[in-house]
Amino acid sequence: MRRTLLEGLRSPLTEVGPPLDDPEMAALAREVGRASNASLGRSLSIRHVDAGSCNGCELEIHALGNAFYDLERFGLRFVASPRHADVLLVTGPVTRNMREALQRTYAATPAPKWVVACGACAKDGGAFAGSYAIVGGIGEVVPVDLHVPGCPPRPATLLKALLALLDGRGR
Amino acid sequence: MLAHCGILRERVLRVCEVAFGHRLMMDMITPGGVVKDLSDDSAYAIGELIETLRDAFPNLVTLYDNTASLQDRTVRTGVLSNVLAMQYGCGGFIGRASGRDFDARRAYPYAPYDHLTFDVPRRIEGDVNARLWIRVHEIEQSLDILEQVLARMPKGPCRVDMPERIGEGHALVEGFRGDVFVALRLNDDGTIANAHARDPSWFQWPLLEAAIEGNIVADFPIINKSFNCSYSGHDI
């Protein structure tokens, strides 16, 4: 068993993080008003909130944990409660049913805190814009610090966004 | 094992992006066909991926099969009875792990499955272990199907214009969670009058409640994930 497990991981699969001058990361960093490292150093605790997503974003957020992206090596980790979080990573349009839950989650997150809106729906409702069942983008309900484009965003883009948030320019 | 499966999954998604332009292949199927034709390079990349999976996957399956501590968690855990699976018309690997012998690709064959050869694995135990084995066998079947499709790919356009027609219709297709049902009615001007999409999870969430009964709390996550129901699918 040990042999099988080690053999499969023999050549390192983890990819080098984005370079400091990555244009996509620079563009994301320009959106961030205040970088988190000034108050929090090199680590971020992230609480993911599904406000009505199709779960496409969830699949890609989950992929951040695989051996290729290995999110935790950057000091980024997911936590199980907003009370433990620095960042709320919110996916989906905000459905009417999730509006209050999102507001309460935001209220339960200790300051300083950041909100990252993940995906096209999180910006303005995306494919669900105009539906009777949704309020709109995340910005309609809680203040958004950074929006990550994509439907869903690629894990590499998500990683760049979180690193941009960390110190305003990447690493 | 999670790390290994995660690696294989990422490899699949990367080939999907190369071949179809989207990692999750979203918006690739459109009325009348698909939006992008498969290039020779893409077909080759998929062929290579199949080789990689055929090489790596059996070792992981053996690992599961030979590790008593894993089996200890899965065998006889979260049993879904055949009676309930039949009563709820439970589709997908959940139904097939509880003895319900149904696959929309075989029961109501539609292209391209009407010309393909594949097995529909079935077990009767209905526990987490049975659902896991069904999924293992379905991966093997999927690789076979992919090879058949690649070998028989016809030439010609990948999309045709749809005839303008009003009326009403419904369809049943097999998704990975089970049979997806869609009913659609059009107005005289071609706009949608009524639409209903029924995700397989509709009939699977209630059964999860029955399957967890009598199990210890620590086994809930493993039973839940062995069902792998969709939240958003249920909301449709």
Image (cartoon, rainbow, N blue to C red):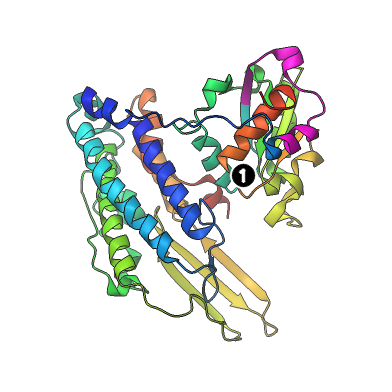
- Residue at the disc numbered 1: A153
Residue type at tag 1: Pro
Q: Residue shown at 46%/30% (left/top)?
A: A14
> Around disc 1, counting alpha carbons within 10 Å, would you say few (fewer than 14), some (14 to 19), or many (20 or more)?
some
Residue B89 visible in the picture = no
Task: Give the chain of mark 1.
Answer: A
Q: Residue shown at 49%/28% (left/top)?
A: A70
Left or right of B28: which side holds A40? right
Q: Residue shown at 48%/54% (left/top)?
A: B18
> In the rendered view, would you say B92 is above or below B131?
below
Task: Tell me residue B48's x, y (percent).
Answer: 33, 53
Q: Secondary structure at mark 1?
A: loop
Give the image quarter of residue A112: top right
> In the rendered view, would you say A13 is above or below B139?
above
Task: Tell me residue B13's x, y (percent).
Answer: 46, 48
Q: Indicate yes or no whether the magenta region holds residue A39.
A: yes
Task: Tell me residue B197's x, y (percent).
Answer: 54, 62
Left or right of A96: which side holds A81? left
